[in-house]
Image: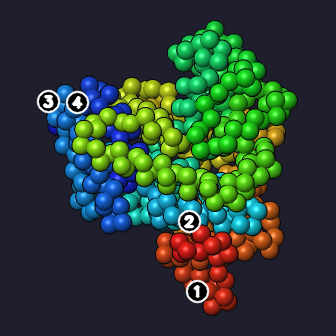
Amino acid sequence: MTKGVKIVTIGGGSSYTPELMEGFIKRYDELPIREIWLVDIEDGKEKLETVGTMAQRMWDASPYDVKVHLTLDRREALKDADFVTTQFRVGLLNARVKDERIPLSYGIIGQETNGPGGIFKAFRTIPIILGIVEDMKELCPDAWLINFTNPAGMVTDAIIRYGKWDKVIGLCNVPVGAMMAEPELIGKSLDELVYSFAGINHFHWHRVKDLQGNDVTGEIIEKMYSSDAGIPANIHDIPFFIDQVKKMNMIPCGYHRYYYRYEEMLNHMLEEYNDPEIGTRAQQVKQTEAELFELYQDPNLDYKPEQLSKRGGAHYSDAACETIASIYANKNTHIVVSTKNNGAVPDLPADTVVEVSAYIGATGARPIAFGSLPPAERGWLQVMKNMELVVEEAAVTGDYGLALQAFIINPLIPSGETAKRVLDELLIAHKKYLPQFAEKIAELEAAGVTVKDEIARELV
């Protein structure tokens, strides 16, 4: 008889945790969980207790006897874990507000995982995840780390590159959303189609074939222009130029809008930024979160509420729980993951992390070869991946020159004095969470650099 599986979730007070619980309950027959530990920090204690109590209600309403433990002590939780999932946000949602509003105050895209905001999210997150990896080496050296902390691609790459930890898989709900929405556009179900994804997190493309080997990508593309095609809730839906997408005969992910329709996306963001009734996406999410946590406090609520789909992270449980179940039961399921390239995308080095279709089993992810991309997409991908590598190194070293280099190479940041100003303001705004840049931040403060945006400045 097996002893059962121990799962630890770091960032357990997240509003997404009920998604995870639902996914684990659904898969209990193939993933017999013994205990779940939800870990958070002191600032998240209240949310942890609310979500943790609800998580226990969800298990109590199921036929399974699973105990949910709550703790602020990461090391206590990690001892002898089988799987560790990470879903935390360093600096909480206020950090995201700053990531969005400071760039937008200078007319530059402010977004959670792209542009300046994505770079700073990596700066804050990578040192923390590397600390978690060090604890895992000591306390649960055989565990798998399943990461869906954003920016998931850079975080997963840093775990392998700087943490020297290979038992890691990065996840995102964006491919899941595409695979759930697209088949019905052409009158098919998902099991009648074969999907192939390639790229990096939030910057991938995919092709689709039917079971006879016919390419149906073009058919889906035609239908996308008259139907909802699974765009994440957090991305403004501006259609891609149809001539461009038909020519590439690949379907870009929702986040490509920031690159293929930069002008329109920026204008939409500036409209929301300048409207005090709406505010940036982070300000909208804070409202949704407040509503969710109010629901979670209901002692009769023992299932995932419908409102969670508004958070932009719907379907996480399907990706995360299916990945864990597939490793545990050696299922060799097709899942789109961030994993070491190993030749799947020959346009990038073998040791870098890519987001690709893979078979997930007991040995982790076995990426499925996609082949070389056409010149335009290859060029985009190589610039973006190398930008990510610069960001990761800057996050680890605290090198200001590298941070500046990352800003200058990023396609969403026009280079020049304004870009440097945004970089400097973000460093000051996130001072508490960027000890690696302490020397440079002190220098900027001494020079009188302050945050221009009033709302962001109040949060500093």
Q: Distance between the residues labelled 2 and 4?
A: 40 Å
- Depth order, front residue of 366/230: 230
Q: What element carries label 1?
A: helix
- Looking at the image, residue 178 lies above or below residue 410: above
Q: Distance between the residues labelled 2 and 3?
A: 44 Å
- Looking at the image, residue 420 lies above or below residue 229: below
Q: Position of residue 321 (x, y in %)?
A: 38, 35
Sequence-wise first label, 2 or 4: 4
- Quadrant assignment for the C terminus: bottom right
Task: Please say if the residues under marks 2 and 3 sit with CB atoms less than 8 Å apart.
Answer: no
To which residue does mark 4 refer?
A: 62
Colouring rule applied to residues: rainbow
Q: Distance between the residues labelled 3 and 4?
A: 21 Å
Q: Is mark 3 on a helix, strand or loop?
A: loop
Can residue 65 be seen here? The reply is yes
Q: Position of residue 260 (x, y in %)?
A: 78, 43
Q: Any mark on residue 129, and which? A: none
To which residue does mark 2 refer?
A: 123
To which residue does mark 1 refer?
A: 442
Q: Is mark 4 on a helix, strand or loop?
A: loop
Q: Position of residue 291 (x, y in %)?
A: 42, 48
- Looking at the image, residue 72 lies above or below residue 87: below
Sequence-wise first label, 2 or 3: 3
